[in-house]
Amino acid sequence: MEPLVPADLEEYARRHTTPEPPLLGELSRETQAKMAMPQMQVGRVEGSFLKMLVALTQASTVVEVGMFTGYSALMMASALPPEGTLYTCEIDPEAERMARAYFARSPYGARIKVLMGPAEETIPGLAAPVDMAFIDADKVGYPRYFDLLVEKVRPGGLLVLDNMLWSGKVTRPDDDSTRALVETARRVHADPRVENVLLTVRDGMMLARRLAT
Ligand SMILES: C[S@@+](CC[C@H](N)C(=O)[O-])C[C@H]1O[C@@H](n2cnc3c(N)ncnc32)[C@H](O)[C@@H]1O
């Protein structure tokens, strides 16, 4: 992923963001050392922003599509109330192993329910209402994940979609992933059930707030 924000500014933002708990620092380092694509992890700034969104929306039910090694799941789970639940979808058993090992060590791990299998198959089984959804998996799946989740998010709830600027490629789409992201942006923006803002945070974060319609 080509960074949109210059490295020195990203580092400045990191330095002026609440430090991550030591366990998440350890998870980050182990992911860097052992996983083939560690850059998929959201990182401290975006992770802290997701945590803040869970806190601000006072969410108690969150759905994540794309758990990987569990960094964003743990960040969001830490802002849930004790009885809250974060459902997270994943297909990679190697990522699952690492995530579960960290969930077991975290005081917030018991709030996380892992759903293994293609998200297209696991999301329909989730009960509504959902307070917040975070979409961060395969990009060709995004239009479908948005369609499935916008139905389940309660009025006033929030959908967050990551990588919506895709290293800047969305202005000149020439592959399936980029085309799917452009279609997702069009779909979110045209949907009368939400109001939305596309933020230039990290790789582009689309926020869509579910309206009462
Ligand atoms: C960008 S990573 C998620 C990063 C994670 N949110 C974090 O911060 O650590 C995307 C993940 O989506 C998973 N994935 C890909 N296709 C999927 C599908 N159809 N259903 C569920 N998960 C999928 C991948 O295995 C990968 O671990």
Image (cartoon, rainbow, N blue to C red):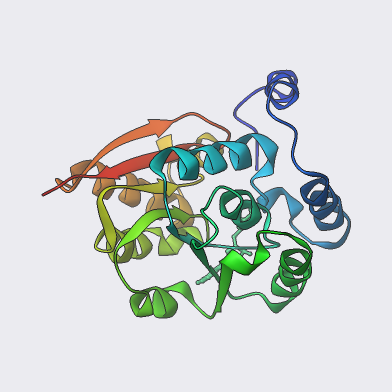
Q: Is residue 175 visible?
A: no
At 64% from the left and 46% from the top, the residue drawn is 42
Ligand 1 picture quarter: bottom right
Q: Is residue 183 visible?
A: yes
Reply above or below: 61 against 79.
below
User: Looking at the image, which residue sits at the far right?
Assistant: 33
Reply above or below: 173 against 101.
above
Reply above or below: 173 against 62.
above
Expressed as whole percent of the image width and height from the top left, the position of residue 130 reads: 35, 60
Q: Is residue 167 left or right of residue 1?
A: left
199 or 24, which lies in front? 24
At 75% from the left and 75% from the top, the residue drawn is 97
180 or 89, which lies in front? 89
Q: Which quarter of the picture shows residue 128?
A: bottom left
User: Looking at the image, which residue sits at the far front?
Assistant: 82
Q: Is residue 64 left or right of residue 47?
A: left
Reply above or below: 119 against 177.
below
At 55% from the left and 58% from the top, the residue drawn is 82
User: Looking at the image, which residue sits at the far left?
Assistant: 213
35 or 176, which lies in front? 35
- In the rendered image, the quadrant that contains the N terminus is top right
Expressed as whole percent of the image width and height from the top left, the position of residue 197 reads: 34, 33
Q: Is residue 7 left or right of residue 191?
A: right
Q: Which quarter of the picture shows residue 133?
A: bottom left
Expressed as whole percent of the image width and height from the top left, the position of residue 100 reads: 72, 71
Expressed as whole percent of the image width and height from the top left, the position of residue 132 reads: 40, 53
At 68% from the left and 50% from the top, the residue drawn is 41
